[in-house]
Amino acid sequence: MRISTKGRYGLRILLDLAAHQADARPRLSREIAKSQQISEKYVSRLILALRDAGIVGSFRGARGGYSIVKPLDKVTLLEAIETMEGPLEVVECLAADAANCERSETCGPRQFWRKFNDEIRGILQKYTVQDLFNSCCAGEQGGLSTLVSLTDSALETAVD
Amino acid sequence: MRISTKGRYGLRILLDLAAHQADARPRLSREIAKSQQISEKYVSRLILALRDAGIVGSFRGARGGYSIVKPLDKVTLLEAIETMEGPLEVVECLAADAANCERSETCGPRQFWRKFNDEIRGILQKYTVQDLFNSCCAGEQGGLSTLVSLTDSALETAVD
DNA sequence: GCCTTAATCGACAAAAATAGTCGAATTTTT
DNA sequence: AAAAATTCGACTATTTTTGTCGATTAAGGC
């Protein structure tokens, strides 16, 4: 029962972009990569999912890069994670295309799994990426107002 | 975020054994295998973990087999699943041997993951294998009293 | 218009985790 | 002693995850 690196990297990318929302230019994959210690190529690849989901905007060519376009207090952790990893399903037979399990719809365990799955999703839906961002750097560095101009190094040591 | 087949098979093995607790002889891996549609070898292999955890008893030789030794209303789903899959940790850095993450103990995301992890474990701890067994076959077949002598086919279509 | 910058895309490769097999050895009953 | 069954370690196969690479496309600045 692990959240894969895709999901965690996606979150880190969002937190990184969050910390640079005040910047004049969009942030480069190279910058995100260095700051988050993920390879540049992989950042470019992963961030496409966030773009397709309408959370991040991408801009090609000179002065291009990435920036947040959807307010992060509107992006739940569930949305972010499912964007990266696909639907969260603790067992296969909960999937939309669940053709594989011919057992009865009254299947006790399945009903339990469904409930369990809903509870997990519920938890992840209660929190937004903004919440995570706030909890991330709200310590001795000061309040939220200082966060938008935090240096990379401050974030580097604070994220996952 | 999937429960692996190990965990689900383990649960199915327990439910199968639960349905045969009234039997005179311990249940053979062959019987469990056939009823649960898992290979006999794999059943034998998986069930060792349940034995080591003290949930199931094993008996070698003629008239040998497996049977429940720990009351299933004392075995939480968390215990059963962790027995099969090891500690449930949504992210690596929650592990006991978490030497891999040098980020600060005040790491916001990690604190969130820990809380999230605890909530998930809490849910799984609220239910026992007996609960699952009851919910499994409590429908039109009648109450719990009839369950101990249910045929395999009844269980086959009801589990997972 | 041309050059530079940067994201985009599809195919591919490596690594890790998962799932499952096999056969010889051991234990117990009859 | 024979038969029945679990046990154990090593081994294999499959799938999923985690990336990489190079060519392409789009935008900006001169």
Image (spheres, coloured by chain):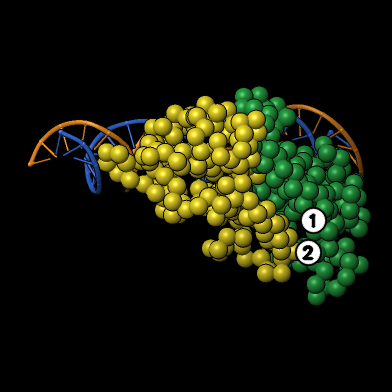
Chain colours: A yellow, B green, C orange, D blue
Check the residue under mark 1 and report the chain it is in.
B
**Residue that appears at 70% across and 26% down:** B97
Looking at the image, residue B153 sits to the left or right of residue B24; the answer is left
Counting from the top left corner in percent of width and height, residue B56 is at: 85, 44
How many neighbours does mark 2 have within 10 angstroms: few (below 14), some (14-19), or many (20 or more)? Answer: many
Residue A6 visible to the viewer: no
Reading the image, the residue beneath label 1 is B15
Q: Quadrant of residue A137?
A: top right
Counting from the top left corner in percent of width and height, residue A40 is at: 40, 33
Residue B92 to residue B62: above or below:
above
Residue B7 visible to the viewer: yes
Nearest the eye: C4 or A23: A23
Looking at the image, residue B29 sits to the left or right of residue A2; the answer is right
Closer to the eye: label 2 or 1 = 2
Circles 2 and 1 in contact, beta carbons < 8 Å: yes
**Residue that appears at 30% across and 39% down:** A63
Q: Amino acid at mark 1?
A: Leu
